[in-house]
Structure formats: C-alpha cells, structure tokens
Amino acid sequence: MENKRKGKFIVIEGLDGSGKGTQAALLAQAMRADGRTVCQTAEPTSSVTGGMLRDALGGHVKRDAYELSALFLLDRIFHNVNEKNGIRKYLDDGVDVICDRYYYSSFAYQGIDADLSWVMNMNLNCKEILKPDVCIFLDVSPDTGDKRINGSRLEREIYENTETQKRIRARFYEVFGLLKTRENIKIVDASRTVPEVSADIIKIYNELKEK
Ligand code: TYD
C-alpha cells in the first residue's frame, strides 16, 4: 500500500544521545539539495498529548508504562491524521517526511515495562498509523549515548540512565527481529563521526528513492 504514496516516509530511531536530531537535519538538507520537498517532524509531537508526554518524560508527572503507551498511541494517531500538517497529508501532497522516533520507540521504551505484544498490536493494527518506507536505527552503545547526553543536557528524562538504555537497546533488537519480514529496517553504526554516519544514511535514502 505504501508504494502508492507520493512522498517517502523515513523514520530515524535510536537510543537517547544517538544523534537522531543532527542526522535527521543533515538528511533533510541532502534531500532538499536533491530537489525534494521535505517535512522534518518528531514524536512526541507538540500537540496537547505531546505536552502531557513531556511532563511525564521529565518526571514531573508520574505515569505507568500502560498510560504512556496509550498517550504515545494517541499522539501518533494525531500525528498521522491531523489534516493541517499530519504525516498522511504531507505524503499525499508528495512531500517526503523524516520523523525522529515513531512506533519502534513505543515498542522498545514502553515495551520494557508494559506487555510488548499489547503495545505492538495497538500500533501495528491501527489503520490510521502509517507504516514507514524505512526505519533507520542509529546504533550506539548505552555508554556512548550517555556521554553525549552529559555534554548537551541539564536535566535527564526518566529513561536516560545507562541501565535502562541497555534494556531498551535489547528490546529494539528483539523487535527488529520480530518485524524483519514486514518492515524495512536498516541499522547504522552511529558511534562513528557525524559525516560518516550521514553518508550511510544518505545512501539508504538513495536506494529508497530508486524503488
Ligand atoms: P527524544 O528523541 O530523546 O527527544 P528529546 O531529545 O527532545 O528529549 O525523545 C523523547 C523521549 O521519548 C525519549 O526518551 C524516548 C521517549 N519515547 C518513548 O518512550 N516512546 C515513544 O513512543 C516515543 C516516540 C518516544
């Protein structure tokens, strides 16, 4: 079904401190230089639900993994269907979408505490939540991610500690194993320099645009 879409839908995933934001911006720049119109977006979004999520991620409001899963689901449906600047609208208009985090984060982050198949089913079985053309996973060790967070943040979010990041990384790999026959997942070694990682990501985009 996604082949009929006019724009390409690219998701960038990774642990905290993996460099998603930097790499998404570089990819957007390369795609624009290639003549494409690109929308760069992220989850949680800036919706009301996104604000509730930020409060919980910052530790200001305590929520359990099931509440978080449901809030991320709501935020993601809104992110897809919102008629003004939703993902579906952009793709239909022929705009490429680069999204920093998507349902893979719900599987890996909420899936360490909530029932993984419940989280996966409610996202994958929701017809309003579009399947990306590719998920690019920026792989760093939790220690590397931790050092990068140290350099750039004043406050830490609830998942931002090395022990939790280790469990999340293991969950990502488990989920990629489960999804490998139905999703296009590319793993990139993100412990290298910014230009090296960027070159690999642009190569993945170039392969995708030929399809
Ligand atoms: P992050 O990319 O770290 O944004 P920022 O650098 O602006 O804080 O994402 C925010 C956090 O949200 C991150 O710790 C992962 C978490 N998250 C989930 O737990 N589940 C989800 O479904 C998504 C999209 C994000």
Image: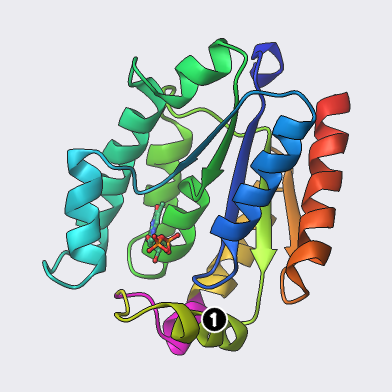
In front of the other: 158 or 192 = 192
What residue do we see at 54% from left, 69% from top?
Answer: 15
Left or right: residue 20 versus residue 73 is right
In front of the other: 77 or 35 = 35
Residue 96 place in picture, x, y as percent: 62, 26
Q: Give the magenta-colored segment's residue range.
A: 158-167
Can residue 64 be seen in this snapshot? no
Task: Decide whether residue 200 is among the magenta residues.
Answer: no
What residue do we see at 71% from left, 17% from top?
Answer: 3
Residue indicated by mark 1: 148
Q: Is residue 32 above or below residue 14?
A: above
Name the residue at the left extreme: 61
What residue do we see at 49% from left, 71% from top?
Answer: 16
**Which quarter holds ligand 1?**
bottom left
Left or right: residue 68 versus residue 25 is left
Can residue 18 be seen in this snapshot? yes
Q: Is residue 47 above or below residue 176?
A: above
In front of the other: 58 or 132 = 58
